[in-house]
C-alpha cells in the first residue's frame, strides 16, 4: 500500500509541475488559444494521483492483490504507458503553443506514439479488471 501512495505522490508532483509549466509557457508566449497542455494537469491528477489513491484505499483490506503477478504486470504497464501518454500530450501542446510547423511524418509520429500509449493504458486497465474479476469469483 505504501508503494501505491508513493506513486500517487509522484504523480501529484508531476501534475503540479505540469500545471505550472502550462501556465508559464502560455503566459510567456502570450498564447490564448486551445492547447493539449491545458489537459495534462488534469490527466495526471485523475490517471495518476486518483487511480493510485483509490487503489490504496480499496486494497488496504486485501493485500493479496498487490502480490499477484497480474497486479505487478498491471503496475509496470500502467507506469510505462501513463508517462508516455503525458509526454506526448506535452509534446503536442508545446508544438501548439510555439506554433511549430511539423512535417507530416513528425506529426504522424507524435500521434502514433500517443495512440500506442492509449492502447497500453487500455491494456493495463483490462489487466486490472481481470484481477478484480478473479477476486470477486474467489470471494463467492
Image (tube, rainbow, N blue to C red):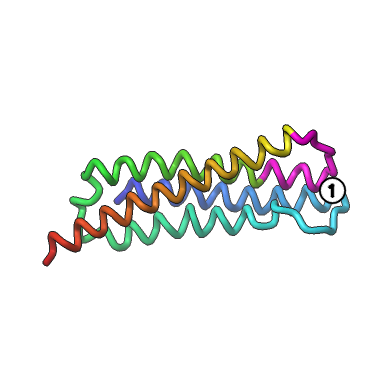
Q: Residue at x 85, y 53 (%)?
A: 31
Q: Tell me how many marks there are.
A: 1
Secondary structure found at label 1: helix
Q: Residue at x 46, y 38 (%)?
A: 80
Q: Residue at x 54, y 49 (%)?
A: 13
Residue 85's x, y, as percent? 56, 44
Q: Residues within 10 Å of mark 1 (few under 14, many from 20)?
A: few
Residue 22's x, y, as percent? 72, 51
- Is residue 70 magenta-colored? no
Q: Which residue is mark 1?
A: 28
Q: Is residue 132 left or right of residue 111?
A: left
Stretch of the chain drawn in magenta:
90-104
- Quadrant holding the C terminus: bottom left
Residue 65's x, y, as percent? 22, 51
Q: Is residue 41 left or right of residue 63?
A: right
Q: Is residue 71 left or right of residue 83?
A: left
Residue 3's x, y, as percent? 34, 45
Q: Main secondary structure of the magenta part?
A: helix
Q: Residue at x 52, y 52 (%)?
A: 12
Amino acid at each position: 500500500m505504501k508503494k501505491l501512495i508513493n506513486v500517487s505522490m509522484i504523480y501529484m508532483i508531476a501534475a503540479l509541475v505540469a500545471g505550472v509549466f502550462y501556465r508559464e509557457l502560455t503566459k510567456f508566449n502570450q498564447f490564448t488559444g486551445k492547447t493539449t497542455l491545458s489537459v495534462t494537469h488534469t490527466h495526471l491528477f485523475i490517471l495518476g494521483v486518483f487511480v493510485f489513491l483509490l487503489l490504496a484505499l480499496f486494497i488496504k483490506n486485501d493485500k493479496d492483490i498487490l502480490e499477484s503477478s497480474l497486479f505487478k504486470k498491471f503496475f509496470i504497464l500502467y507506469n510505462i504507458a501513463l508517462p508516455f501518454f503525458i509526454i506526448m500530450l506535452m509534446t503536442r501542446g508545446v508544438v501548439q503553443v510555439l506554433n511549430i510547423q511539423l512535417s507530416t511524418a513528425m506529426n504522424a509520429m507524435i500521434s502514433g506514439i500517443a495512440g500506442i500509449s492509449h492502447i497500453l493504458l487500455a491494456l493495463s486497465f483490462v489487466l486490472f479488471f481481470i484481477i478484480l474479476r478473479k477476486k470477486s469469483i474467489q470471494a463467492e
